[in-house]
Amino acid sequence: MYRVSRRNLLKISGAGAVAASTGGLAGILATRSAPAYAQQRTVHWLRWNDFVPASDQLLRQTLLPEAEKALGIKVNFETVNGNDLQPRITAGIQSGAGPDLIMLFNNHPHLYKASLTDISDVAEAAGKEQSGFYDISKGNCSSDGKWMAMPFGIIGAMLAYRKSWFDEVGHTTFPTTWEQYRDAGKKLKAMGRPIGQTMGHSFGDPPTFSYPYLWSYGGKEVEEDGKTVAVNSKETVESVKFMVDFWKEAHDEGGLAWDDSSNNRAFLSGTICSTLNGASIYIESTRKPAQYQTDKGTPMKDDILHAPLPAGPAGQFGFHTFQSHVLPSYSQNKDATKAFLGWLHTASNYEKWFTSQRGFSTAVTASWEKHPMWGEDPVMAPFAVAGRLGRIPGYPGPTGQKAAEVLSKYIITDMYAKAIQGMPAEEAVKWCENELVKVYQV
Amino acid sequence: MATTTEAATGTPRTRTRLLEDERWLAFFLLMPTIVLLALFIAYPFMKGILLSVTNTRVGVPGEFVGLAIFEKVWNDGIFREAAWNTIYYTAVTTVFKLALGLWLALLLNRHFRGKAFIRAFILLPFIIPTVLSTFAWKWMFDPTFSVLNWLLREIGVIDQRINWLGDPDLAMGCIIAVNVWRGVPFFAITLLAGLQTISPELHEAAAIDGANARQRFLYVTWPLLLPVTMVVVLFSVIQTFADFQLVYVLTEGGPANATHLFATYAYQIGVRTGLLSEGAAISLAMFPVLFLVVIFQLLYIRRVETR
C-alpha cells in the first residue's frame, strides 16, 4: 500500500502551488496584485422563496445558466424565507462578508444606505430602456438622486374574494367602502365564512393592509416635514374604533397570529371569503384546479376575483410590497454583480421572469403595463397598473430611514392589533404616537 | 542538519521541564478553555457593552453616547412588556418544570417493568432539536388547521375554534406549555440521578422510626435532594430567561408584542431593524438580573453544602 508521508505531501502540494502560480511568486510581488485566476467571478445571490415557485425554478434551470454562459460568471442562487432577508443583510454588513446581491422588501434599502454600492449606472440604463421607473420605485430605491437599490418587482396587493359567496349575501358588485365591506363580512361570518386578514409580524400582508387603511381615514404617521409625528388625530382614532368592531363582526379572529402564508392556506381550504394578498392564491388555484374546489365541487379558480381595498372617508389607497436588490459595499465581486444585474434587467431576459410570475409581481418600469400577458387572464388584469397606484410607508412624509424603521418595527400594524386585543382606541393611538416620536424625533 | 538535530533534542527537554512545574501545567491545561471562553463569551460580551454605549446602526459606526441608549430602552413600552414577559415566563415555567420533573423523577425511581425503556423515552422532548419540535407545536396551534381544535370539536368540548396563538394570554400560555414540555425531562433525569444517590437505608431507618411516606419525603428525600435541585433550577432559570428559539418559531413575539422576551425583542430591534446599540442594550438588560440570580443561588448552595 502506498502511504502518503507528511514529507511527501508537503513536496507534492508545494510543487502544485508553484506550478499553479504561472508568473511565480516574484511576479505576484512585483505587480502587487493577486494573480487573475484567484479573483472570484462568482455572484452569490440571495432571494426569498418566491410565492410563485415556478419563477425560482425558471431562474435555477434556465435564466442563471444562460447568464453564466453569457457573462462567464458563476451564480450561486440561495433562497430563504422572506422574513429572514433583513437578518442576513445585517449579518453580512457587520461581518463584512456575505451574499453579493440581496433582495430586500419595500423601503428597507434606506436602513442600509450607508453600506450599499451606488448602482445608478445599471438602474438608469434599465429605466431608460423601459419607459422610466414608477415613483414608488424611485422612493423605495433611490436617495439624493442616487440609486442604492435596483427595483425588481411590485407584488400588487388586492383583495382576493369568492364571487359566489358575496353574491349570496347581496353584494353582487364588490364593496367599495369600508362600511359596505364590513356589512358583507358580517353576513358572511355569520355563515361561517369570515374575512381573513393577517395582523401579525410578517413583512407582507399586515403592513399592506394597515397602512392604506390608516391613510384611507386621513390618518398619517408623520407630517410632510418628516419630523412632526401626526398619528394622534381624530381620524386615526376613528379608524381604530371602526377596525375593532369590524374585526369582531367580520374577521377570522385567528388573523392576529397569521403570517404571510396563513391566509393563502385558509382561503384555499375554503374557510375565508376574502383576504388582502398578492395574486398567489389565485395563481395556485389555477395550477391545481382539481385540488382546490368549492363546496359545490367546481374549481375554486372560477370563483375568485380581485378588487382593490375599499375607500375610507379620505379616499382609496394601496400599498404594494416592493422587491429590490442591493449590492452591499463589502462585496468583492462588484463588477460581476453589476454586469449580472444589467443582464437580468435587459428587457428580453427580464421578460422571461416577468411572464413566469403571471402577474403576481408586476414590473417596476412603465412599459410592462402593455405586455400581452395581461390580456391572457381577465382575473389578473387589475394587477397590471399596481405600480402606478399605491404609496410608500411614511406617506405623506418623505420615504427614508425613519419610515423604514417604523415599518420594520410593525408599529402601525401593532396599533390596530393592540386595539383588537382590547386596548381602548385612544390608548392604542397614544402608544403608537410614543413609539413614532422615539423614531422621528431623535 | 546539525542545527536541526540540536533543536529537535533541545525543545522537548525545555517543554518537559516547564510542564513539571505545576503552575505551568495548570496554565497549559486551562489554556484551551480560556481561549474558548475569551473568544465566544468574553469578546461578544465586551463588544455588546461597547455597542450599547454608542449609537451604532447597521453599517454606521456610532459615537459614544454614554447611557443614553439605556435610557431610551428603559422608556420603551415594548421593552417593559418584554421584561415583564421574561420574568413571568421564567417564573411560571420553572415552577411547573420543577414540580412535574420532581414528580416524574419520583415515579421513575420506583421499580417497574420497562424502566430503562421509559427512562430513555422520557428524554425525547429534550433530545429533539427545539426548532423542530416547536414547529410541530406551531402546527398544532395553527389558527385555522389546529389539530387540537379539531380534536376538541370532535369530542364536543368546543364549537368555535380556540385562537391559541392569536390571543395574548393564550399565546403566553402556549409558549409556557411548550417550554414546560421541553424542560421537564431535564429536571426529571437530573433529579432522578440525585434521588439515586440517596441511600435506601436512610428511608428504611425512617420507616422503622414510624415515618410515613409524606414525612419520609419531607425530612429525608427533600433535604438531601436540595443541592441538586438548586443546581438544576439555576441552569433552567438561566436558559429560560435567555430563551429565543421557542418564542421565535411559535409567535415571533406576537400578537402585538404580547410574547416578546428579552432575546426575541433584542433580535427584532438589533438584527431586523438594524439598531445594533439598542439591540445590545436590550440583551444586556438581562445581565444584572441573571447575575443576581446566580449569586443568590450559588451562595445558597454553598450554605446547604457546608451545613
Image (cartoon, coloured by chain):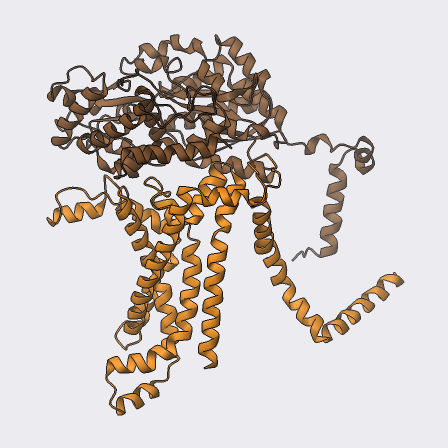
Q: Is residue A28 left or right of residue B131?
A: right
Q: Position of residue A109 (x, y in %)?
A: 51, 27
Closer to the camera in the image, A202 or B25 = A202
Provide the letter of the chain coloured orange: B
Q: Identify which residue, B93 or A24, lies in the foreground.
A: B93
Q: Work out whether residue B264 or residue A156 is closer to the camera in this orientation and state it.
A: B264
Report the residue that reaches farthest toward the right: B2
Quarter of image, res A48: top left
Q: Quadrant of residue B229?
A: bottom left
Q: Is residue A360 visible?
A: yes
Quadrant the N terminus of chain B occupies:
bottom right
Q: Is residue A268 visible?
A: no
Res. A376 image quadrant: top left
**Image height of B221 relative to A230, above or below:** below
Give the drawing colour for chain A. Answer: brown
Q: Position of residue A168 (x, y in %)?
A: 11, 21
Task: Please tell me which residue is depicted at 13% across the width and 19% down the height of the picture.
Answer: A167
| x and y, in percent, of residue A79 in the image | 45, 34
Task: Name the residue rendered at 38%, 79% in the picture.
Answer: B224
Quarter of the image where the C terminus of chain B is located:
bottom left
In the depicted structure, whether residue A152 falls above or below residue B254: above
Q: Is residue A261 left or right of residue B14?
A: left
Position of B300 with respect to A265 (left or right) is right
Q: Residue at coordinates 25% horizontally, 29% vertically from top-left?
A: A241
Q: Nearer the viewer, residue A295 or B4?
A: A295
Q: In the picture shown, does residue B163 fall above or below A55?
A: below
Q: Residue at x 20, y 17 (%)?
A: A174
Q: Is residue A329 left or right of residue A177?
A: right
